[in-house]
Image (cartoon, rainbow, N blue to C red):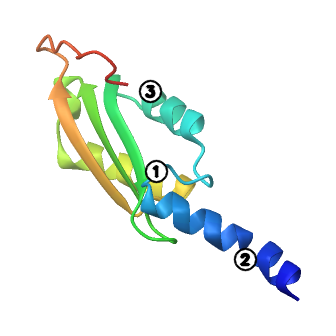
Amino acid sequence: IAVVIAISSWRLFRESLDLILLAAPTSVDLESIKKDISNFEGVKKYHDLHIWPISTTEVALSVHLVVKSKFFNDAFTKKIVKKLHDSYKISHVTIQLESAEINYECEAGCE
C-alpha cells in the first residue's frame, strides 16, 4: 500500500517542489511563448522574460517588449495578454513597453 501511495503522490510532490522553487511550470512551452512574442506585430525585440507559478493552477509572466511607437498603447498590450491567456493559460501577465525609437541596451543575460 505504501508503494502505491508513494507512486501516486510523486506528481503532487514534484509540483509542490516546483512551486516552492518558483520553477517555470512544465505545462508551459517556453520556446513557443518566445516565438509567439517575437512574431507579434509591432514587437522589435523582447528581454527579461520570466515565467513562474503563483499556485498549482496559476502561472505568471513578465516581459519587457521593445515596440514601435504606434503600438505603444493599451489595446496592443491587451492583445498580447489575451493571446498568452488563451494559448498558454497564463493568468497574470505584466508587460513593460519600451519604445523602439530609444536605443535600449540590454544588460547581460537579459533574455
- Asked whether, in this view, residue 51 is left or right of residue 18, the answer is left
Seen in the picture, residue 10 relative to 28 is either above or below; the reply is: below
**Residue type at the position of mark 2:** Ser
- What's the mark number on residue 52? none
Q: Are marks 1 and 2 in contact (CB under 8 Å)?
A: no
- What's the mark number on residue 83? 1
Q: Could you give the CA–CA distance between mark 1 and mark 2, rounded to whole angstroms?
A: 33 Å
Q: Name the residue under label 2.
A: 9
Dot 3 or dot 2: first in sequence order is 2
Q: Choose mark 3 or mark 2, whichever is in front.
A: 2
**Residue type at the position of mark 1:** Lys
- Asked whether, in this view, residue 63 is left or right of residue 103, the answer is right
Identify the residue at image location x=40%, y=64%.
91
- Asked whether, in this view, residue 52 is left or right of residue 106, the answer is right
- What's the mark number on residue 38? 3
Dot 1 or dot 2: first in sequence order is 2
